[in-house]
């Protein structure tokens, strides 16, 4: 069952839906796409079905930051770069992570961020601005070329890329994956199936799980079991 929680950060009221299993092993913060909702994402993908040993947090975006297909910022969304909205979303995550570390102290070093589309871009921003708060990152259908080229702290990541994505530049999504491979200095390649390849550094144990599917911009449900494999590996 999902429970609704609320808090205030940077003078703004924020909400999230939370699933807590009997014996949680880690925490996943999930960020929907522009115009989406926490409830809508949760009902469509039911991440806790796949990540049943995780505390799953579906964060709710708020309006106010324009860009892309929402130039006036009328829809729920997330900041795309440092300084957007006076860093309202970064401050919200600071507050939320503090709450989660208090509520689940044994999991303070096992927090993951997962984002779709605009939420995926925000996940790259968290990697850039708050790397120490997270063990790893899962990004669907977005890119972080500018942030990666500026230099990020090496972390494990899972990137999901649709070959027919018509919303976010496919080439930049692939370039992001290449930059992550360089960042972790991978020295081993493991093809898992026709869609998933794992690039790993056998010394540091950091890895990139790159899932390339034939579809478009949505999160492909066949990738979700592999998201679970990524966080439990």
Image (cartoon, rainbow, N blue to C red):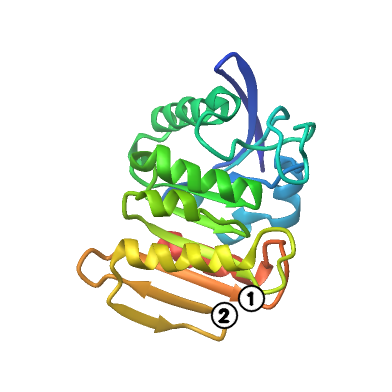
Between 127 and 182, the one nearer to me in the picture = 182
N-terminal of the pair, mark 1 or mark 2, is 2
Quadrant, the N terminus: top right
Q: Is residue 221 above or below residue 7?
A: below
Q: Residue furthest top?
A: 11
From where the camera sits, is residue 144 visible? Answer: yes
Spatial CA span between label 1 and label 2: 6 Å
Q: Position of residue 44 (x, y in %)?
A: 75, 55
> CB of mark 1 within 8 Å of CB of mark 2?
yes
Between 160 and 192, the one nearer to me in the picture = 160
Residue 18 in which image quadrant: top right
Residue drawn 48% across and 25% down?
95
From where the camera sits, is residue 21 visible? Answer: no
Residue drawn 68% across and 67% down?
221
In the image: residue 214, left or right of residue 203: right
Q: Is residue 143 above or below residue 222?
A: above
Disc 1 packing (10 Å; few <14; some 14–19; many ≥20): some
Residue drawn 77% across and 42% down?
35
State the residue position of label 1: 213
State the residue position of label 2: 195
Residue drawn 57% across and 80% down?
195
Q: Position of residue 84 (x, y in %)?
A: 58, 30
């Amino acid at each position: 069952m999902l429970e609704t929680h609320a808090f205030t950060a940077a003078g703004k009221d924020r909400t999230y839906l939370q699933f807590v299993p009997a014996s949680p092993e880690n925490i996943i913060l999930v960020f929907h796409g522009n115009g989406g909702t926490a409830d809508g994402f949760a009902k469509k993908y039911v991440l806790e079905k796949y990540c049943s040993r995780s505390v799953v947090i579906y964060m709710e975006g708020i309006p106010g930051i324009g860009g892309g297909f929402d130039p006036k910022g009328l829809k729920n969304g997330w900041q795309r770069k440092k300084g957007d909205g006076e860093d309202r979303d970064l401050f919200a995550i600071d507050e939320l992570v503090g709450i989660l570390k208090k509520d689940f102290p044994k999991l303070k070093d096992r927090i993951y961020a997962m984002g779709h589309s605009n939420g995926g871009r925000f996940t790259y921003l968290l990697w850039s601005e708050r790397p120490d708060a997270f063990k790893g990152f899962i990004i669907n259908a977005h890119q972080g070329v500018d942030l990666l080229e500026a230099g990020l702290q090496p972390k494990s990541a899972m990137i999901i890329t649709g070959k027919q994505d018509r919303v976010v530049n496919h080439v930049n999504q692939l370039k992001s994956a290449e930059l992550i491979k360089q960042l972790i200095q991978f020295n081993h390649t493991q093809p898992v199936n026709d869609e998933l390849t794992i690039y790993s550094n056998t010394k540091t144990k950091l890895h990139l799980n790159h899932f390339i599917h034939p579809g478009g911009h949505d999160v492909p449900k066949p990738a979700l079991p592999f998201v679970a494999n990524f966080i439990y590996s």
